[in-house]
Image (cartoon, grey):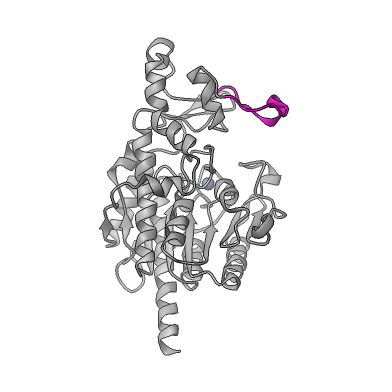
Amino acid sequence: MTIDGGKLDVPVVWHEDCLRHQPAGEVWLGLREDGTEVPERATVILSGLQGAGAPVVATLPHDPAALLAVHDPALIEHLRTIWADWEAGGYPADYGRDRVVPYVFPTRAMLAGLPLRAPAATHGRVGMFCYDTMTLVGPGSWEAIRAAADCARTAAGLIASGQQAAYALCRPPGHHAGRSGYGGSCYLNNAAIAVQVLRTAGVSRVAVLDIDAHHGNGTQSIFYDRPDVFYGSVHVDPGAGWFPHYLGFADERGDGPGLGANQNIPLAPGSGDEAWLDAVARLCEQVRNTGAEAIVLSLGVDAAAADPESPLQVTAGGYRAAGELIGKLGPVAVIQEGGYDLASLGEYVLAALSGLQSGLTARTEVSATE
Ligand SMILES: [Zn+2]
């Protein structure tokens, strides 16, 4: 695929360790299935972007402080150590459990108001942090989780130092991970890490635009009471029966000082370019009104018509148009979220980034003539 006006200039931040996470399936409705969050997702995207001439940039050295800025230390420690504990407990060798998966969850209904205690058993502990059965941990998972966070931090750093766009090829994705818990194939919230890097660098207002097909419940919850970070998302309606089921409704508008800084636009299953782009344009208008100085774009391309994980019907042209709208808003750190159709994944990400590039160019030309 070629792009208008030559090659793609957006730097692609990448770390090989993102390939080390091999969830080897997911447990969905009680059965282990193949799963779609596979390492090939990243290689397909990388080769698509390199083919368009995009420069590839290495990550900065790992900085634990960037993770701790938005996550509970206990979650990070769990993700760092759980595979070793699982192995030491004999779960793979003695019981044939080759991946970490929870089976009991300390929900509100279970605890009935009593305090949460840390369970003694490793297999009892996983449900304290992991809220579904689809988000497995294996031997290289932590290295990939950490590398994805480093990609996000590096891309945000490029924006903070004056770049107009940078793309973090994060795998695993992150927008379903909250401050203290993980699920939805996400472990740490790469977009939230990027936001906090920008804030710490002195960007006073940041907006997150989440155009993944699913609601980014983790990002929403991390910033729900903060007025300095706007979160806007267009996604398939959880009220029509879609993940994450419990969050992502239009009446979730933020809390306390953050009231009004959260906007969800749920769409009916089957929605295509017209409804989706109309929602993206409405979110862009809101971002403009917040006075955000930088954007973090949670770029999931699973709204693609051919994607196996969502019923939305957005075309590559739709993603290109969305990129163009968003590029006109200001500097953008792009964070890769979902997108699972290996045949079209590279084309869709390239379409979004080339749209972004032309939006940014249009914006720079306008401001140069003002
Ligand atoms: Zn998604």
Residue 191 position in % (x across, y down): 47, 52
The correct choice, above or below, for 98 with respect to 196 in the image is above
* Magenta stretch: includes residue 115: yes
* Residue range of the region highlighted in magenta in the rendering: 103-117
* Magenta span: chief secondary structure: loop
Task: Quadrant for the C terminus, please.
Answer: bottom left
Counting every numbered tag in the picture gives: 0
The correct choice, above or below, for 315 with respect to 117 in the image is below
The answer to whether residue 21 is visible is no
Q: Residue furthest top?
A: 94
* 302 relative position to 333: left or right: right
Task: Quadrant for the N terminus, please.
Answer: bottom left
Residue 192 position in % (x across, y down): 49, 52
Residue 292 position in % (x across, y down): 53, 69
Q: Residue furthest bottom?
A: 369
* 189 relative position to 249: left or right: left
The residue nearer to you, when weighing 51 against 117, is 117
Q: Quadrant of residue 2?
A: bottom left
Q: Residue at the location (36% across, 60% down)? A: 157
Q: Residue at the location (70% across, 45% down)? A: 240
* 269 relative position to 339: left or right: right
The correct choice, above or below, for 291 with respect to 239 in the image is below
* Magenta stretch: includes residue 4: no
Q: Residue at the location (53% across, 60% down)? A: 209
The residue nearer to you, when weighing 185 against 38, is 185
Q: Residue at the location (44% across, 45% down)? A: 68
Residue 85 position in % (x across, y down): 40, 21
The answer to whether residue 312 is visible is yes
